Each structure stands twice: as structure tokens, then as C-alpha cells.
Amino acid sequence: MQTLSSAGAAARRTRAALRIALSHYVANGLSVAFGLLLISGGLHLWLGTVAGAAASVGVIVASPPDLAAPRRGKFFQMLPAPLISLPLFFVVQWLHTAPLQLGLVLVPATFLSFTLMAWGKRGIPIAIAIMLAMIFSMATPPPTDLHEALERTLHFGMGAGLYVVYATLVNLALNARYRVQLIADVLLALANLMRTEARQFSAKDETDDVRDSPAPMLGQLLTQQAALADQIQAARDIVLESPRTPRRQRLAGMLVMVLEMRDHLLASELDLDVLRTHSDHAGSLGEMRAVLELIANDVTHLADSLLLGRKPQAGQDRRPTLSAIAIPTYTGRPDGLAAPNTAVLARGLASRIGHLNDEVVRLTALARGEREPDLAVVRANWQMFVSPTAWSWRPFLTLFNWDAPPLRHAIRAALAIAAGYSIAVLLPWGSHDYWILLTIVVVLRGSLSQTLERRNARVAGTMLGCVLAVGLLSTHPSALVLLLSVTCAQAVAHGFAVRRYLITAVAATVLGLVQAHQLYAGAAPTFALVERIADTLIGAAVAWGFCYVLPSWERSQIPALVARTLLAQARHARLALGLGQLLAVDTSPELEWRLARKEAFDSLSALVQATQRSLSEPRAVRPPIEPLERLQAHSYQLLAQLSAVKSMLVLRRDRLTPAEIEAPLARAAEQIQSAIGNPADASAKAAKAVEAAQAGEAPAETTSAPRTRVVGPVPLPDPFDNDISPWLLRRLDLASGLALQLHDDAARILQAEAEAETMAGLLPKEA
């Protein structure tokens, strides 16, 4: 038995390793490495070792923005890094022997480069590339004259320029493969989310997860939902671009179906808490869990087939297994006013898992080419679902605000570089000043949690990387071996930069040390392991210390993120509950709803990630975690309720009575809009509570006053009867109640924030 278990574990590890090897980020890393080998090796053969080493620096500097990306805008995404880096590389060369003047250039240049982070994910790689240009320019031997400095800069520019052209062409060539890999990546993430969801199908005392009191299981679900939202957007940017050919349309159709599967999965846990409190349903819930895990395995196998380029196996219908589950008849008292008996709830839950099964079967058929994709919405409007590729001045204008996080981070980075450079110049072994600065650049992030993560990985990775570099350089390798080593290190460092920074830190250390050795053109500088590690520790300490200089705590972003989440939830509710999509002759209402659903998930994802980052911050500056977790949980539940309603309106409209649901739908949309459609209302309530506390009055209750129910108590029939209108009305009533809870959660969050600011003296106090 133990042998079989070990064999199974080994097989799982092998499959996981194969998925990594076939992923888009490894393919991207290999393409970058091949470009480095091609360009650096070519210039090495043409112009010599020194020229090849300088050109390789140009390639390394130009490569950070080179990620799997849409075809449109790729060239202009790559172009800013070498254009800005080229003059800075030359200036550092020119001032190489003038430490004071060099420092006066490094500090303002650091500030300007870090302001590019205002452009978010597009700006961060460019900022890093600019810093790498200056730091690697410091790693070269001092030029003997101006001519040598210009010559190195020319070779640097040749490497960077050639790489921009190369990267644009390779991204075009790999576009088809990237589409498949990103779809597979999303499917694997969805399968993992299914398995986490399946763990909820257990007795309540086994998982200790309750929806009205957020617990670790719910936190894991929210984290995975946030990660899935990011992966889906990355896939949208590439997969939905120009879906004109049959192959592209099939992949785009698969992505659209994944979005529907996410909704069905979200709705699959409705009423689960009630069933988990009844021990007689433990067996049926366990069988449903097994079916959900089988469906997750089907999705995983489909992803593996895509990665391997194989035709997927035909989808297996799990509905017979679901139908065979023995569900106990109801024997106790109904749970609450107008609630159905637990047997009916269990049948409804099995039915929602059945809808998820149907989507997986259709998805597999689409992947096999046995089904035509439904792209009526995205075929003509794909630009509305993808991230913009054109550069805009709007992020730059946001910098003119003292509280703007990108501005404060740029100032913080400039001060950290100034301190690190001063320390490096004063150290007795001052030949490695660039290593301290490089450590600061890669460790210092915009938030404390990210900096701490990078700090630990950087120190551990540098130690291991130094050992590997010592072993390599001690063999006195030839120029070809060094070039191949740099190529391999570049592939690993670039490929895992986002996925696993520890691996990147090891590879980047080897890359940096071997690159520095090459830049010295065989002068064989003495390699001191202790000094390198000391430089790394100094740089990591400086970066960590400057996290507390002009900090941008997550608390300052929470009110805006809460407001965005509430507005997105209200708009999604209004469009999800509208009958326009069912009555319209075109796809305009569906397009609006899909965009609203996208923003609802994206805004909740941003709030979840900000809350998680705040847990690493000092307790005194953390936002109110408990109400934030409640708001996230209630937002998650509201999305689930609306997903169930939308499923009824779209998939089971023939079993609804329009006259009974039209008015409640409009009333529910109005009540949700009234509750959360105006976040300023919650803000005003928070301000009044703070004023009352300052005046010594008892704080007012934050619970909203009772409002008219969408429906009154109605009997709930079996969901498999002809008319399911009462079930839809129940969902509407629960959704309206969740909106009221969201309003109260937001008021508590904003009240806690206002009180914290008042206590800190950030707000004027009443006399």
C-alpha cells in the first residue's frame, strides 16, 4: 500500500513538473534566452568578446517587458525600455570614475524610473529595465576614454535594439501557442478552485467554515477566486484578440465557457450551509463531493491534453452518478420562514453540480472540434474585454498628489538607492557597489508584504546562486560556456520571475555574477563569496528599512477599493436582474452584463489582494480586517445568488412565470441599488458616527432599518416541478438581504478608518 502511495505521489509530481515545463511562462523564458544567445553570440563572433558582453547587457535590459502579450502594441510596449536606458547607460559609463557625480545621476534617475510604476503591470518591467541598465553599466570596468564609453554604449544599444525586433517577431510566432497555454493555465486554476469548493461538502465540524463568520476555508476560496480573475484577464488579453480563424474562435469560445463554469461553481455552494448542519445528509454530500472532484479531474485532463497538443478524450457525463445519489427525505422542521425542506435543497444542489457537469461536457466537445463556439458577443466587441495597449498620460497625472502610492514609492526608492550607494562607496571592498543597488531594486516593492517576500527569497537565492557561480567560475570556463551559462540563467530567471521568485533569485544571481565576469573581458576579478553575501544582506536590509519611509499602507487604498466593489456589485445586480437580455433582438444587453460581471470579479479580487497584503503591515496601521472579511464574504455570496438567478433566467426561462417575476426582479434591482449603489451614503453614516463619538454620544447602530421584502413568505415547491418562479423569488430576497449587509459592512469599514484617522490627528477634531 505504501509503495502504491509513493508511486502515486511521484506520478503527481511528474505531471506537475511537466505542466510547468509546458507552461507559457517557461516558453517565454526560453524565447528570451534564445534571443540572448542569438544576439550576444552573433555580436561576439562579429565584433569580439567585449562587444558580445555589452550586447548581452542590452538584451537583458530590454527583456523584462517581454512577456506573453497580445500581438498588437507589442513593439511599442518593448520600445520605451531601451530608449530610456541607452542615454543612462552612457552617462554611468562617462561618470564611472566620479562617485559623487555618479550618485547625483543615480538618485534622480531612480526617482524618474520608478514613477513609471504608475502605469501598473505595464510600467513595472520598464522601471526595472532602466535600473538594470544603470546597475550593469556600473559593473563594467571603468572606460579608458570617451571613445570606449561610446563604443560600449553602441554595443549595448545594438543588443537592446535587435532584441526589441526579435521579441516582437517571436511573440507573433508564439501567439498561437500562447493562446493554448493560457487557456490550459485557466483550466488548471479552475480545477483547483473546484477541489477547494468540494472540500466544503463535509460536515460542518470538519471544516469549521461558516459564511456569516469568515474562516480560513472561505479565505482560501476568495484567494483562489482572485488569482483566477487575474489569470482570466491575462487569457482574455491574448485569446480574445482578433478571434477570426476557426482555431482562435474555438479557444475564445472555451474561455467564454470557463466564465460560465465559474458562475455555476459559485452557485454550487448555495444552501450548502443548511445541509451541512444535518447529519443525515453527510453521505449524500460526500457523494456530491466525489462527483465534483471527478469533474475537476476532467478539467485537469482537458488542460493536460491542450498542453501536450493531443485531442482530448470525449467528455464523460456525470449526471447518471448524480441521479443515483440517495438523498434522505426530510424529517425535521424547515429551516426558517418559507424555507424548503432539506431534501429539496439537496436535490437543487445536485442539479447545480449537474449544470457544471454539462458545461464541462460541452467544453470538451468544443476542444475536440465537435461543437461550434458561441461568440456572438465577443467576436465584434473583443476590444472591450482586453486590457488597453496604447500608452496614456492619465497615470502620469495621478502622480501630482502627495498621497499617490507611485509617487511615494518613487521617492522611497530614490532615497534607498542613495543610502545603498553611499554605503557601497564607503565599504572597504567597494568593487561590488552595483550588487547592493541591484538587491535594493529587486527587493523593494510597493507594499511591505511584497518586500518581505522578496527580501527572504533574495537572500536565500543569492546564497545558493553564489555557491553555484563559485563552482562555475572556479573551472575557468571558456567564453562559449559562459555564454551558455548566461543563456540558461536568463531563461530560468525570466520564466519564474512572477511564479516563483526564489528560483528567479538563484538564477539571477548566477546571471549577474557571470555577466559581471564577462564584462571584465577575462580579467578574472577575484570572486569573494562572503563579500557578495554581505552585499546582498546590506541591500536587503536597506530595502526593508526604507519600506517604512513615506509608507503607502494598504489602509489608504481601502475606502476607494470598497467603493469600487460596491458600485461594481450594484451595476452587476442591475444588469443581471434585467429582462432586457431575454427580450432584446441583439446582443447589447448581454455585452453590458458580461462587462459588469468582469468588473464585479475584478474589483472584489483587488480588495481581497489588498486585504491580504495588509496582514504583513504593523498592527497599528492595518485596516479593519474583520469587517473587510465580512464584506468580501457577503460580496462573494451576492455574486453566487445573482449567478443562480441568471442561470434560471437563461437556462430555465421556460419554467418561469413572467407575470410573477417581472415586478420582483425590478424591485430587487432597485433595493440593491439603493443599498450599495451609492457608497457615499455609507461614508456619510461613518462620518456621523465619528462626530457622535467625538461629542461623547453613544454610537448609532450601523444595522440598516428593515426594508420591504422582495417577496413575502411563499411555499417553495420541488425545484424539478414545472414552475420554479418561487425559487427565483427566494434568491431575489436573499440577494436583497445581502446587499443590506454589504451596506452595513462598508459603513463599519469606513467608520473604523475615519476613527483611526481622527485618532492619528489626520482629521480636524471638533473643539
Image: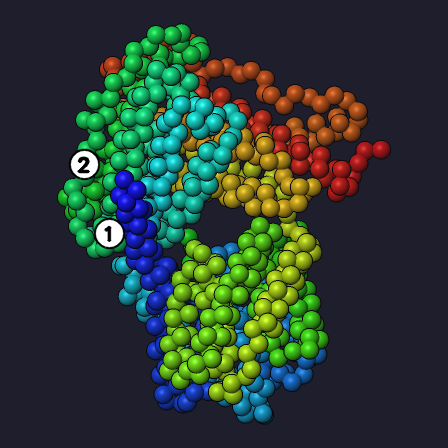
Q: Residue at x 66, y 41 (%)?
A: 619
Quarter occupied by the C terminus = top right
Q: Give x and y (percent) for residue 681.
A: 61, 30
Q: Residue 34 or 204: which is nearer the viewer?
A: 204
Left or right of residue 146, residue 55 in this image: left
Q: Residue 653 or 166: which is nearer the viewer?
A: 166
Q: Residue at x 58, y 92 (%)?
A: 144
Left or right of residue 597, residue 581 in this image: left
The residue singled out by tag 1 in the image is 306
Q: Residue 740 or 33: which is nearer the viewer?
A: 33
Label 1, secondary structure: give it: helix
Left or right of residue 614, residue 215 in this image: left
Look at the image and tell me whether residue 132 can be seen: yes
Q: Give x and y (percent) for residue 17.
A: 33, 55
Indicate the amino acid at tag 1: Leu
Q: Residue at x 35, y 61 (%)?
A: 26
The residue singled out by tag 2 in the image is 316
Q: Residue 698 or 221: which is nearer the viewer?
A: 221
Q: Residue furthest right?
A: 767
Quarter occupied by the N terminus = top left
Q: Residue at x 43, y 36 (%)?
A: 221
Mark closer to the chain start, 2 or 1:
1
Label 2 CA crowd tier, 10 Å (few <14, some 14–19, many 20+): some
Q: Residue furthest front?
A: 2
Indicate the amino acid at tag 2: Gln
